[in-house]
Amino acid sequence: MPALALLCALFVVDFERLVEWRYGAAGIVGLLLLSVGIKAKSPAISSAGAVLLAVLLAGPAL
């Protein structure tokens, strides 16, 4: 069980580093809003984070 928790924590940290490297501070803010909104069960906050991440992902295509 502790090995699985450690593996999950490493995955989350690496994913956050990837988002920050690729999309900068705005990506971290979007990821933070999304995760806080999901944990707080607040659709408004999680939607704001999802929209911010979607805009960052679609930015080069627009």
Image (spheres, rainbow, N blue to C red):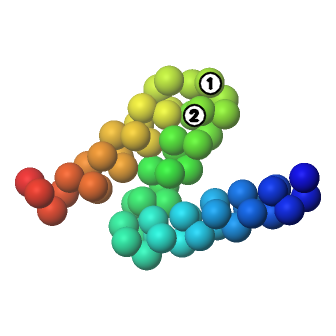
- Mark 2 burial class by Cα count in 10 Å: few <14, some 14-19, many 20+: some
Q: Which mark is residue 32?
A: none
Q: How many marks?
A: 2
- Across and down, in percent, residue 25 comes to 44, 66
Which residue is at a point 35% across and 47% down the rendered structure image? 52
- Whether 40 is drawn above or below 13: the answer is above
Q: Quadrant of residue 35?
A: top right
Which residue is at a point 54% across and 72% down the rendered structure image? 17
Left or right: 52 in relation to 25: left
The quadrant of the image that shows the C terminus is: bottom left
Which amino acid lies under the numbered mark 1 shown in the image of this protein? Lys
Q: Quadrant of residue 12?
A: bottom right
Q: Secondary structure at mark 2?
A: helix
- Whether 62 is drawn above or below 3: the answer is above
Left or right: 44 in relation to 11: left
- Across and down, in percent, residue 47 comes to 42, 32
Contact check, label 1 and label 2, Cβ < 8 Å: yes
Q: Residue furthest bottom?
A: 21
Left or right: 12 in relation to 55: right
**Which one is in front, 13 or 43?**
13
Which amino acid lies under the numbered mark 2 shown in the image of this protein? Gly
Left or right: 11 in relation to 19: right
Which residue is at a point 59% across and 70% down the rendered structure image? 14
- Across and down, in percent, residue 3 comes to 86, 62
**In this figure, which residue is indicated by the disc labeled 2?**
37
- Across and down, in percent, residue 22 comes to 37, 71
Q: Residue furthest left?
A: 62
Q: CA distance from mark 1 to mark 2?
A: 6 Å
Q: Secondary structure at mark 1?
A: loop
- Mark 1 burial class by Cα count in 10 Å: few <14, some 14-19, many 20+: few
**In this figure, which residue is indicated by the disc labeled 1?**
41
Which residue is at a point 55% across and 64% down the rendered structure image? 16
